[in-house]
Image (tube, grey):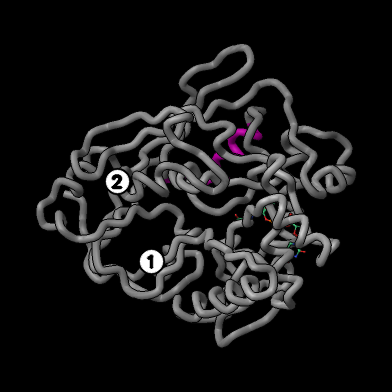
Amino acid sequence: MTKIYEKYSLKELNSFKVDVYTDYYVAPKSLADIREVISDNKYEDIPKLILGGGSNMLFTGNFKGLIIHPQIIGISIESDTENYVIVKVGAAVIWDVFVNWSVEHNYGGIENLSLIPGTVGASPVQNIGAYGVEVKDTIYEVHAIKMDTGKHRIFNNEECKFNYRESIFKNKLKNQYLITHVYFKLSKKANFKLEYGNIQKELNNFEEVNLKTIRQAVINIRESKLPDPEITPNAGSFFKNPVVTNDKFQKLIKQFPDIANYPIDKDNVKLAAGWLIDHLGWKGEIFGRAGVHKNQALVLVNMGDAKGEEIIGLANKIRMSVLNSFGIDLNFEVNVY
Ligand code: EPU
């Protein structure tokens, strides 16, 4: 019988290091253990939350339910052809441990996603992305267990309904499936993506361009801009980059000629929320025990024992400020509980 803890502290299980507890907590190690927990009548009618690395969530109070923290690990090659490999990875494997493994084996596709915090199981949920790559580009299948029936289901890439920081697991099927494994299709042939931002510039510091140097370049860029959650608790980008119509963009660029933007198609343009927030002077601002990171305005940080409400309070001030100045309503990328 897998042990279920009561009044369990979540402080070390969320990267904002918010000090809250959950009524019940369980860390099942196998599919059998997971099925045992979800079929236990005692927990049938209470809210359940599946926890990965806790690096994209903000708790605003104690969790009145059961937190399931799966511990399924392992990386194995399921098929190996001339051009690619299919790799099966346990949901609890730390994302960057897997990226490092893939680079060491010379399998390409996820090197630009180096150093993103969190677990492999959480990677498809919000379709993690950085430096011109999204995890959806390499996901072959997602294997999951249905929470109410315990049945196994395989989602192919299309069924995951991936979009910018979105998937079916975050929307229509939110909390309905527990992801146990993700299967990735990684390339054995070089196919580097170096166009985004200053990757190319950073790579000039290296003699060769290969998976290892690209990984190191990404790590260098991230470390220079983003706070280390172990030192300054945070959850990465707090807001999503907003998409506006081209008409709206044309008005904005007249008023703000240097506004950072990425055209999506002929009707839509993605804007950098970091630029909007920075332009309004929020970078480095501190309110109580919550703050805006000094090097990247998209990231909110816990300056020390902040409560979830303080961080949300700051996020809402920023949201209102951006709405008033640019007429754009920012959405949170972080999941708030
Ligand atoms: N910018 C500013 N001020 C700031 C931040 C950004 O002017 O404080 C400008 C930059 O100069 C640049 C533009 O905004 O022109 C974009 O900035 P950056 O390249 O740093 O990327 P981002 O759009 O702010 C996104 C992701 C990050 C990811 C980077 C790199 C989202 C919400 N965020 O940030 O992802 O690392 O691109 O690919 O899409 C995360 O999701 O947690 C995360 C960190």
Q: Secondary structure at mark 2?
A: loop
Q: Secondary structure at mark 1?
A: loop
| Label disc, if present, on residue 337 of the rendered structure | 1
- List the residue tagged with mark 2: 176
Graded by Cα atoms within 10 Å as few (under 14), some (14 to 19) or many (20 or more), the crowding at tag 2 reads some
Magenta stretch holds residue 103:
yes
Q: Main secondary structure of the magenta part?
A: helix
Residue in view at x 46 percent, y 21 percent: 78
| Amino acid at circle 1 | Tyr
* Relative image position of residue 68 (x, y in whole percent): 30, 54
Residue in view at x 67 percent, y 28 percent: 106
Q: Which region is colored magenta?
A: 92-104
Q: Is residue 235 above or below residue 170?
A: below
| Label disc, if present, on residue 147 of the rendered structure | none
Q: Nearer the viewer, residue 171 or 111?
A: 171
Graded by Cα atoms within 10 Å as few (under 14), some (14 to 19) or many (20 or more), the crowding at tag 1 reads few
Magenta stretch holds residue 126:
no
Q: Is residue 89 left or right of residue 152?
A: right
Q: Is residue 176 above or below residue 334?
A: above
Residue in view at x 21 percent, y 59 percent: 4
The count of marks equals: 2
Q: Residue furthest left?
A: 41
